[in-house]
Image (cartoon, grey):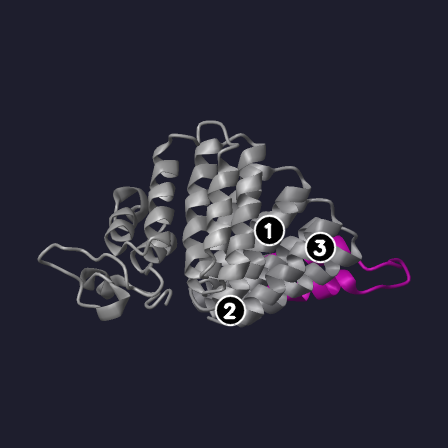
Amino acid sequence: MAAQKINEAHEHIAKAEKCLKTSLTKWKPDFDSAASEYAKAAVCFKNAKQYEQAKDAYLKEAEYQTENKTLFHAAKAIEQAGMMMKEQKKMPEAIDLIEKACMMYMENGTPDTAAMALDRAGKLIEPINLEKAVDLYQKAAGVFENEDRLRQAVELLGKASRLLVRLRRLDEASVALQKEKNMYKEIENFPMCFKKTTAQVLIHLHRGDYVAADKCVRESYSLPGYSGSEDSVAMETLLQGYDEQDEDQVYRVCNSPLLKYMDNDYAKLAISLRVPGGGGKKKKAAAAPQGGASGAPAAADDEDDYEGGLC
């Protein structure tokens, strides 16, 4: 079966080369037909699992689609070439090709297609390169934002923010979260604004910036429904406990369902939060924390990816 597909691919390539030849009666190469034959060859190679040859065929298709001034189809072919690199586990090369395709989508006036391709690229690279995934998600969000598609933009910004937290790039994460919150405010999704405020507070406290955390909460009172909400009560309680170095109060808020069931990266920030100095009131229960001065509950240590958040 594979050998048959490979033979078919070479037949299509031969036809493509014939389409490109000129003669006394044929003055111009037939780029359209050549591109079509290379596309068929690429599919045959892909079906035969000859991914390197499939990639080359897709790039040939893209070359002749470009000559034919059909940029959208050229971009599609380049994106498919990138997917052939993905099949070979050559992720950096795959992402380079997909980004090149996205530039062509933009030039062709199809930004939505570009943004969706960037999102797909982010998902591909995320398991092996978080930094690159952040870059791709932010680029995709920027494209959607320019098109006034804020719901799509804010979803991608959310992916980037969570990865920035995972990377411990907390200053950048706080900026990204503020942008998210502004977008949610613009589309009047106020409950999500509340959640973003909670995430911001956790980030600011891990950065050791109580003033910024407090300011976040104060500003959120201008949002409809925030005053008296579960989120606002929890944040006021957390800030009070943190300011008074009351480890028991901070522990109770950070281990409440409201925070424990946030997106995983933010939940980890919550369970790893420490009060500064650790000299305040501690839990009086029998299962008192054994973390010494930090006042950290021992049970949290197993899951703590952000150990020693503040001191």
Q: Residue furthest top?
A: 224
Is the residue under label 1 in contact with that under label 3 (CB below 8 Å)? no
Mark 2, secondary structure of its residue: helix
Measured as percent of width and height from the top left, residue 107 is found at 75, 51
Q: Main secondary structure of the magenta part?
A: helix
Residue at 65%, 57% in the rendered image: 101
Q: Quadrant of the N terminus?
A: bottom left
Q: Check disc 2: other Cα within 10 Å, few if <14, some if 14-19, many if 20+.
A: many
| Magenta span includes 307 | no
Position in image of residue 212 (x %, y %):
51, 52
In the rendered image, the quadrant that contains the C terminus is bottom left
Relative placement, left or right, of 65 versus 275 is right
Q: Is residue 17 left or right of residue 296?
A: right
- Which structural element holds mark 3? helix
Asked which quadrant contains residue 78, the reply is: bottom right
Q: Mark 3 — residue?
A: 104
- Residue in the image at 91% along x and 62% along y: 24
